[in-house]
Structures are given as C-alpha cells and as structure tokens.
Amino acid sequence: QVQLTESGGGLVQAGGSLRLSCVASGNGLWSAMGWYRQAPGKERELVATITMRASANYADSVKDRFTISRGRAGNAVYLQMNSLKPEDSAVYYCYARGYRSEREYWGEGTLVTVSS
C-alpha cells in the first residue's frame, strides 16, 4: 500500500515562508506529483503540480510566490511557499499519480495557518 507522508506545515505570520515536503513509500514511478489545499467551507483546489519531466503548473493565486520541485529519486515533492497570506491558510494535501496505473494517491494533509 502506497503512503504519502507530508511534513512542514505550521503557523507563520503573513509575509513569512514555509516549505512542505512529501515522500511516497515504495519504489513506484510517479508521472505527476503535487499539492492541493482545502480551506474550511471550501472545495479542495489545485496549488501546484509537477510532472516527471519537471513541467510545473501553478494556480494563479500562488504564482510567483510558491515553487514546486521534485527530489532526484522522483518519489518526493516539495513546495516552497514565500510571501504567505492569510488566504493561504488551509490543509495542504500531497498528491501522486502512478506512471503505469495512473492511480491517484493522497496524503493525509498538513495544516498551514497564516496569521495576519
């Protein structure tokens, strides 16, 4: 059973930075990995994704502030979040899509809280 383990969430003041990490268990290949977030009372939304060829896609709301990257082994994904705003507060979920199976996996989420 594949597990995605997230870390790096926490409380930060507006304008600050956080770095989220996610590692996938096992030796699978991942065609895409990324981050989604869900704020209270809202639907889960895309934050950023990155393919195995390092092509990145960002939500307009985080462009120029967040940077997504993958580890060299291809089983980890990181999200560097700068210039954080209160509206970035949410539970952030790691996402991975299997290369052959195209099955999608999700982490349990890590809470990011940005105070004003």
Image (tube, rainbow, N blue to C red):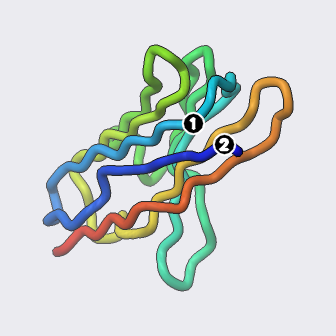
- Proximity of marks 1 and 2: CB atoms separated by less than 8 Å: yes
Comparing 8 with 40, the one in front is: 8
The kind of secondary structure element at disc 2 is loop
Location of residue 93 with respect to 33 vertically, above or below: below
Figure quadrant of residue 33: top right
For label 2, the residue is 2
Figure quadrant of residue 9: bottom left
- Where residue 50 appears, x then y in whole percent? 56, 30
Please tell me how crowded label 2 is: few (under 14), some (14-19), or many (20+) other residues with Cα within 10 Å. Answer: few
Total residue callouts: 2
- Where residue 109 appears, x then y in whole percent? 49, 61
Label 1 vs label 2: CA separation? 6 Å
Q: Tell me the kind of residue under disc 1.
A: Ser
- Where residue 39 appears, x then y in whole percent? 48, 74
| Furthest-right residue in this view | 101
- For residue 59, say whether it is visible: no
Q: What's the residue at 33%, 64% (across, down)?
A: 112
Comparing 105 with 83, the one in front is: 105
Comparing 75 with 115, the one in front is: 75
- Where residue 106 appears, x then y in whole percent? 63, 53
Is 14 on the left or on the right of 80, as rendered? left
Figure quadrant of residue 32: top right
Residue 5, numbered label: none
Q: What's the residue at 70%, 26% (across, down)?
A: 31
